Image (cartoon, rainbow, N blue to C red):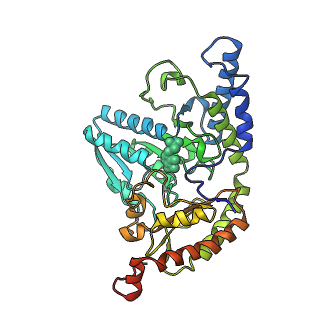
Amino acid sequence: MKIYVDNAATTKMSQRAIQAMMPYLDGVYGNPSSLHTYGQEAAEALENAREAVAKAIGAEANEIYFTSGGTEADNQAILTGAILGERKGKKHIISSKFEHHAVLNTLKQLEKQGFTVTLLEVYENGLVRLEDVKQAIREDTGFVTIMMANNEIGTIQPIREIGALCRERGILFHTDAVQAVGHIPVDVKKLKVDLLSLSGHKFHGPKGVGALYVRKSVPLQKFITGGAQERGKRAGTENIPGIVAMAEALQESIENLSESQNHILSMRDRLIEKLREIPHSKVNGDLQYHLPGTVNMCFEGIEGESMLLLLDAKGIAASSGSACTSGSLDPSHVLLALGLPHEVAHGSLRLSLDAANTQEEVTYICEVLPEVVAYLRSISPVWEELEKGERKHVI
Ligand SMILES: *Cc1c(COP(=O)(O)O)cnc(C)c1O
């Protein structure tokens, strides 16, 4: 059996998205800036895609800017927020401890340039508290950026409440909604966000294409300079096949949202119920304010990396957290932000389900995973110490 449960890292492109993309790789390959028919057909496809993406998140077409993905959208949003704040003499930024690195590392860069950044706690349940945002706001706060759904543990933040607060205080607000768009309903007007990032490959579109929503009244700053594409705010010939396919994938995800949510939720609930029976294990993050498909667990006494390799050998493709931090042996900054001790954060596993997964696959995972954990514990010196009582159980 081959099971892919790493959909938070990336998703398989949908057939509809692939089909939508094909004509723009083959016949309609013009540059949308060209005046001839080839170019004009491409330009029309570009604007149709812009309309579709806008509609999917409750925005207007002229509020959508296409980018090379979620990372670029996050960078452009944050640098814009920082610059606009600075113009008003406000160089304090509020964010959270468990943002994606596309956000955290951009903020680090800004700190080197004289900005002050407050990273809010996310507590054991993996939720930012509105009260903490209120407390953190200072005279010189010019910008707030808080992710909508966390990529490692799946918790959903109170974006609507934070949006209302920021709007009331006249502070610019960005949300990295890369894990949310296409998976839960997202409406920029209801959420009162000024800037919002999304990425095609997290909802069955292609990699290397994303979008940034920018509320009409916000003057987006440009960082990639060159031609006048994207209304002068993001230069470079547009990735037409990618943009068209992303728009199609997004429409498809939204059309199927309620049906796929139910299916995914029922698989997730079964997984959690079964895997919780493994002794000294823990499900991470609040389960109410949570994406349907993401399950993050810790198992005491074992290494996440060894678990992943054994699961892979059994045909199960999962993750120990975010794809961006694997390869380093540091425990995930997200799990540490939840207050988990290093040794527990090391034994983490993320299973991220999708509508294409099946109940049979869930049954198989529920059979295999407890065996893998038991085996790894049987050869783990840490587990031996725990068993002998030389070390205390934390979970
Ligand atoms: C994947 C992801 C990103 C980065 O998006 P790319 O398109 O891969 O650059 C940013 N933020 C979150 C929360 C993500 O999950």
Residue 305 lies, in percent from the top left, at 47, 63
Q: Position of residue 199 (x, y in %)?
A: 56, 42
Q: Quadrant of the N terminus?
A: bottom right
Q: Nearer the viewer, residue 269 or 162?
A: 269
Residue 348 sits above or below residue 10 on the image:
below
Name which residue lies at 53% across and 38% down: 69
Residue at left offset 25%, top offset 39%: 114
Residue 297, horizontal then vertical, whole percent: 51, 69
Left or right: 213, with 94 as reference point = right
Lateral position of residue 139 relative to residue 29, left or right: left
Left or right: where 327 falls relative to 287 = left
Q: Position of residue 252 (x, y in %)?
A: 71, 44
The reply to whether residue 37 is in sight is: yes
- The picture quadrant where one finds residue 342 is bottom left
User: In the depicted view, which residue is nearer to us: 209 or 157?
Assistant: 209
Residue 296 visible, this angle: no
Q: Quadrant of the C terminus?
A: bottom left
